RNA sequence: GGUGGGUUGGCCGAGAGGCGAGGCAACGGACUGCAAAUCCGUGUACACGGGUUCAAAUCCCGUACCCACCUCCA
């Protein structure tokens, strides 16, 4: 079975047919770097990271572009509030975002373009739109340039809306628009309220780019006029993606073949607003669970399903994930586990619009099979499959992306092993003498040092209790 | 007003006409000196009211409630 994806534009699951055999070009709308990222923000990144890994796993050569919006109204406003330059705020928050994504093993994109670095490309596109009669400079001398919605008959096609049915924008500042639904391609510099650093020269006077144009220009630059998949959060469908598509097509670009949108993570039934406080910021959440566990929690739900975030559910997910890790540890005791093949049921689940919940079910089924058998070779096969599946989901505990593991330090392991071995010997003697009180006391003593002892048919085994 | 999505067992979370996805929790059993880990077993879930059908959580009609977007939100 080949990959099938739900395309927002057609509202159905369709076979994925790339423009070029064996290649996939993906553009994902990243973040406006205005504040610290919270778990809601990074869900989108995790979802599209899974898409990317699955495409790569099935043999595609993937070009993955994820932008950052590093200049916009909110950045300017927040920076002004905080009394620091907007570019410093954007740069700092960009750094936070990069760290947050790395901590949940989201692969760096092929390239991460920023709006401020692509003003010439945007101006070029605006110019073309003006020439073609789809954009106009505001007649009020504001320096704004607007896209002329009425000039593009298929405006609204992405979200299935008719222009006349749209709620007239209660735009506080209609500033010379021909139609209230027209949107800004270029925003003239407001001398009295905006820093000079936030303005770039243009044929329409100094100003800065509108929001939507950056994605059209950057997608075109790095992926070409036509590319395979465009992704982002559901809220971006309108106006952002509708506008992107209208601009690009009006400029003569076919643009994206498929549109994918991930659903929200909410708290208390409400959108995770950026002003909600910091308890759900990624570093905060990672004080409670490990990055791999947070990622597992996200991957356990389908990307198009709304998730109601709760720490209880997060903790449960973490417990489930540890079961998988425990199995891998067990298998590793027989010898190194090589990454194997993904089971057919897993591939079928992933091919069906990235059915990660069903894929995770296969993961657990495979763990159970591996735990059930007494045969080390069979167990190794299961473990290899488990590692392959985890790899696709970006959850392989052995991935160096999760940082150094205790078990990686061979000298330390040997030292602890020597110390524990002596104690275990005493415990074995006590057990042989049926002095179970003493045996348990020794086990407790070891446990107090943070080391868990388990008895197996092959004898006692110790492991570091790292909260798992 | 327009557009789209949702309501599934104690909890999380899939499925989209017929076989109880999976996880967490709980209970029983096996293994163990006791544990731990693991395995086996245990559930008459699909917001409500009608309808279609041999068969409906799934399709249709209606109702209720919730959510998102409608011009700079992942």
Image (cartoon, rainbow, N blue to C red):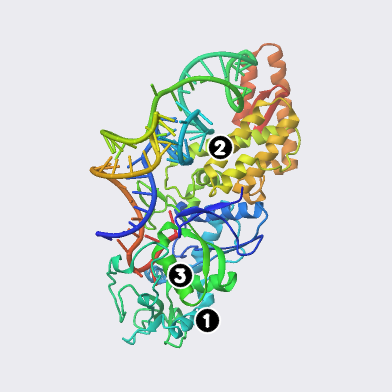
Q: Secondary structure at mark 2?
A: helix
Marks 3 and 2 sit apart, C-alpha to C-alpha, by 37 Å
Which quadrant is home to the C terminus of chain A?
Answer: top right
Residue A106, image x and y in percent? 58, 54
Looking at the image, residue A388 sits to the left or right of residue A292; the answer is right
Residue A202, image x and y in percent? 46, 86
Residue bearing the label numbered 3: A244
Query: Do the residues marked 3 and 2 share a common chain?
Result: yes
Q: Residue at x 55, y 57 (%)?
A: A99
Depth order, front residue of A190/A258: A258
Chain where mark 3 sits: A
Residue bearing the label numbered 2: A361
- Who comes first in sequence, dot 1 or dot 3? 1
Query: Do the residues marked 1 and 3 share a common chain?
Result: yes
Residue bearing the label numbered 1: A120
Marks 1 and 2 sit apart, C-alpha to C-alpha, by 49 Å
Chain where mark 2 sits: A
For discs 1 and 2, the disc positioned in front in the rendered view: 2
Chain where mark 1 sits: A
- Who comes first in sequence, dot 3 or dot 2? 3
Q: Is residue A144 visible?
A: yes
- Who comes first in sequence, dot 1 or dot 2? 1
């Amino acid at each position: 079975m080949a990959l099938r994806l739900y395309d927002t534009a057609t509202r159905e699951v369709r076979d994925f047919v790339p423009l070029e055999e064996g290649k996939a070009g993906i553009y994902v709308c990243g973040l406006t770097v205005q504040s610290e990222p919270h778990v809601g923000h990074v869900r989108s990144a995790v979802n599209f990271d899974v898409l990317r890994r699955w495409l790569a796993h099935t043999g595609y050569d993937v070009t993955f572009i994820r932008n950052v919006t590093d200049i916009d109204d909110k950045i300017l406003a927040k920076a002004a509030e905080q009394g620091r330059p907007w570019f410093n705020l954007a740069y700092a928050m960009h750094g936070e975002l990069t760290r947050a994504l790395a901590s949940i093993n989201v692969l760096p994109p092929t390239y991460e373009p920023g709006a401020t670095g692509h003003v010439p490309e945007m101006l070029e596109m605006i110019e073309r739109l003006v020439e073609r009669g789809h954009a106009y400079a505001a007649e009020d001398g504001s320096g704004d340039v607007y896209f002329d919605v009425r000039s593009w008959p298929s405006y609204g096609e992405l979200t299935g809306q008719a222009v006349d049915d749209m709620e007239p924008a209660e735009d506080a500042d209609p500033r010379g628009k021909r139609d209230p639904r027209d949107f800004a391609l270029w925003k003239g510099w407001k001398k009295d309220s905006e820093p000079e650093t936030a303005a770039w020269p243009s044929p329409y006077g100094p100003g800065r780019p509108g929001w939507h144009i950056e994605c059209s220009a950057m997608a075109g630059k790095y992926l070409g006029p036509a590319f395979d998949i465009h992704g982002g959060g559901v809220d971006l469908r309108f106006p952002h993606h509708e506008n992107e598509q209208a601009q690009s097509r009006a400029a003569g670009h076919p643009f994206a073949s498929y549109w994918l949108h991930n659903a929200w993570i909410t708290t208390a039934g409400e959108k995770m607003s950026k002003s909600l406080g910091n308890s759900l910021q990624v570093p905060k959440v990672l004080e409670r669970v490990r990055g791999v566990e947070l990622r597992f929690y996200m991957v356990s739900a389908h990307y198009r399903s709304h998730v109601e975030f709760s720490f209880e559910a997060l903790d449960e997910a973490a417990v489930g994930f540890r079961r998988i890790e425990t199995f891998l540890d067990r298998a590793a005791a027989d010898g190194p586990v090589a990454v194997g093949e993904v089971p057919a049921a897993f591939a079928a689940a992933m091919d069906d619009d990235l059915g990660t919940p069903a894929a995770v079910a296969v993961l657990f089924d495979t763990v159970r099979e591996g735990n059930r058998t007494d045969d080390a070779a069979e167990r190794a096969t299961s473990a290899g499959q488990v590692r392959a599946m985890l790899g696709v989901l970006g959850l392989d505990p052995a991935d160096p992306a999760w940082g150094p593991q205790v078990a990686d330090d061979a000298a330390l392991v040997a030292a602890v092993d020597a110390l524990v071995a002596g104690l275990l010997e005493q415990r074995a003697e006590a057990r042989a003498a049926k002095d179970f009180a003493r045996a348990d006391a020794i086990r407790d003593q070891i446990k107090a040092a943070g080391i868990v002892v388990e008895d197996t048919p092959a004898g006692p085994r110790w492991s570091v209790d790292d909260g798992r």
